[in-house]
Image: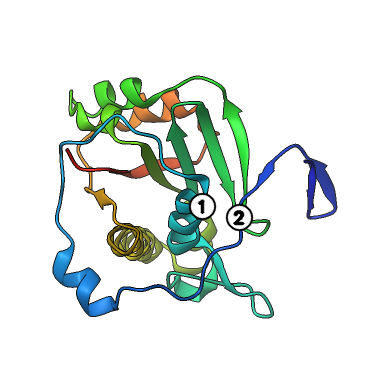
């Protein structure tokens, strides 16, 4: 169903509303989190995908337009992409929706770009954290690059802990060819890939 964001209609898929209470404590999630590199070839439910994206960058305070992870100056330089079996999507934060970028399964191409880390292709989804540094360096100068990279870490840890709470596993992937990943995702100029976060069911 088409949705509206910023006054413009766009063809995007609205995600299920995120749950604000779960059955696992933060302490338990921290204790259970581990990096997993062997996954079943199994799709994730849309409800779980919704929850993971919300934990990553979802809006948690609509009045002040604040998100799930902290950002220097609340400038939010991150852009989030999702790769799964039925295509590549861009996460529309304000609408909590997915905009389809491509109907191709790019997970194998991402695994190849990540120097053959095959689990990137095997996991149910890959969340790719990207950044537009200019959003933050315009205020903080070169220091803004560090702030952005720190923010990517905040967002990733939210994903990892949310995955545990959902009975899923995950791993952080930072080893990849930046230009290759940017090409696979079709990233606009100025958008840089920082992190690949495979999430799925452990073998």
Q: Could you tell me residue 145's position as x and y percent? A: 36, 58
Disc 1 + disc 2, Cβ < 8 Å: yes
Alpha carbon separation for disc pair 1 and 2: 6 Å
Locate residue 160: give its quadrant: bottom left
Locate residue 142: give its quadrant: bottom left
**Mark 2: secondary structure:** loop
Residue at numbered disc 1: 47
Residue at numbered disc 2: 16
Q: In which quarter of the image is the N terminus?
A: top right
- Front residue of this view, candidates 134 and 48: 48
Query: In the figure, 161 relative to 36: above or below?
Result: below
Q: Could you tell me residue 54's position as x and y percent? A: 50, 61
Q: In this view, does 74 lie to the left or right of 128?
A: right
Q: Could you tell me residue 52's position as x and y percent? A: 43, 56
| Residue drawn at 41 percent across, 23 percent down | 106
Q: Is residue 39 left or right of residue 138?
A: left
- Report the colour scheme: rainbow
| Residue drawn at 85 percent across, 53 percent down | 7
How many numbered circles does the render carry?
2
Query: In the figure, 90 relative to 111: above or below?
Result: below
Lower sequence index among marks 1 and 2: 2
Residue 137 shows in the view: no
**Extreme residue toward the front, this view:** 23
Mark 2 nearby-residue class (10 Å; few <14, some 14–19, many ≥20):
some
Q: Could you tell me residue 91's position as x and y percent? A: 56, 47
Residue 153 shows in the view: yes
- Front residue of this view, candidates 27 and 129: 27
| Residue drawn at 36 percent across, 74 percent down | 23
């Amino acid at each position: 169903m088409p949705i509206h964001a910023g006054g413009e209609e766009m063809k995007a898929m609205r995600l299920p509303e995120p749950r604000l209470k779960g059955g696992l404590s933060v302490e338990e999630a921290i204790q259970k989190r581990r990096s997993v590199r062997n996954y079943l070839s199994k799709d994730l439910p849309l409800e779980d995908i919704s929850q993971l994206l919300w934990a990553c960058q979802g809006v948690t305070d609509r009045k002040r337009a604040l998100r799930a992870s902290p950002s220097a100056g609340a400038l939010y330089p991150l852009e989030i992409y999702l790769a799964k079996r039925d295509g590549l999507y861009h996460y529309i934060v304000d609408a909590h929706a997915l905009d389809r970028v491509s109907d191709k399964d790019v997970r194998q191409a991402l695994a190849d770009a990540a120097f053959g880390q095959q689990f990137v292709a095997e996991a149910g989804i890959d969340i790719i954290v990207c950044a537009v540094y200019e959003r933050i360096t315009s205020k903080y100068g070169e220091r803004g690059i560090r702030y952005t990279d720190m923010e990517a870490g905040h967002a990733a840890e939210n994903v990892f802990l949310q995955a545990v709470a959902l009975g899923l596993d995950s791993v952080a992937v930072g080893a990849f060819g930046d230009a290759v990943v940017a090409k696979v995702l079709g990233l606009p100029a100025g958008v840089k890939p920082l992190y690949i976060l495979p999430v799925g069911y452990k073998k």
